[in-house]
Image (cartoon, rainbow, N blue to C red):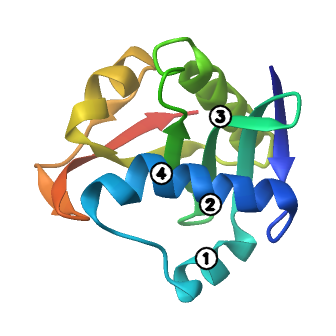
Amino acid sequence: MALKLIDHGSKEYQQMVELRYQILRKPLGLSFTMEELEKEKNDILIGCFDEEKLEGCCMLMEEGEKTVRLRQMAVLSGLQGKGIGRVLMMFAENIARDRGYKRLTMHARGTAVGFYEKQGYNICSEEFFEVTIPHYVMEKQL
């Protein structure tokens, strides 16, 4: 298992878009727009690889001077529950700390709240709907 930063537009980035589509968007009948993908140029793109194959990914988007938001966490079907998400979270938190961020937030799907709570995140909002499903704002001080 190798964790690394991914360059926007690279071959690894194309794998990342496909994984996010298959896990996060396709089940909801959604896709990505070119505008959405273009906005990711300034995000910190993170992947977990086995050899050349992407097994999990997430991204960090700056929300403020000291706050970064985790987005688009996805792990291949069949590999969920095997620790890839936890390792991705630790790696993302370390990158955020190294870059001077003090707080990490996210819009967590209702079905993922338990996972994030185990990583030390707290719910800090009422339930809201995003991409047609329930979410909560969660955060952790870094």
**Residue drawn at point x = 73 percent, y = 75 percent:** 41
- In the image, taking residue 13 as reference, residue 90 lies left or right, namely left
Amino acid type indicated by mark 4: Gln
Amino acid type indicated by mark 3: Glu
Q: Tell me the crowding category of disc 3: few under 14, some 14 to 19, or many 20 or more residues within 10 angstroms, Cα based.
A: many
* Pointer 4 or 2: first along the chain: 2
Amino acid type indicated by mark 1: Leu
Provide the secondary structure element on which disc 1 rests. helix
Does any portion of residue 70 appear in the rendered image? no
Which marked residue is nearer to the observer: mark 3 or mark 4? 4
Q: Quadrant of the C terminus?
A: top right
Residue 58 % position (x, y):
60, 46
Mark 3 to mark 4 CA distance (whole Å): 25 Å
- In the image, taking residue 19 as reference, residue 120 lies left or right, namely left
Q: Does the CB distance between marks 1 and 2 fall below 8 Å?
A: yes
Residue 17, label in figure: 2
Mark 4 to mark 1 CA distance (whole Å): 15 Å
Look at mark 4 in the image and give the residue it sits on: 22
Query: Residue 114 lies in what quarter of the image?
Result: top left
Look at mark 3 in the image and give the residue it sits on: 93
Provide the secondary structure element on which disc 3 rests. helix
Mark 3 to mark 1 CA distance (whole Å): 23 Å
Mark 4 to mark 2 CA distance (whole Å): 9 Å
Residue 129 % position (x, y):
15, 60
* Pointer 1 or 2: first along the chain: 2
**Residue drawn at point x = 46 percent, y = 14 percent:** 81
Q: Is residue 41 above or below residue 112?
A: below
Q: Is residue 120 above or below residue 52?
A: above
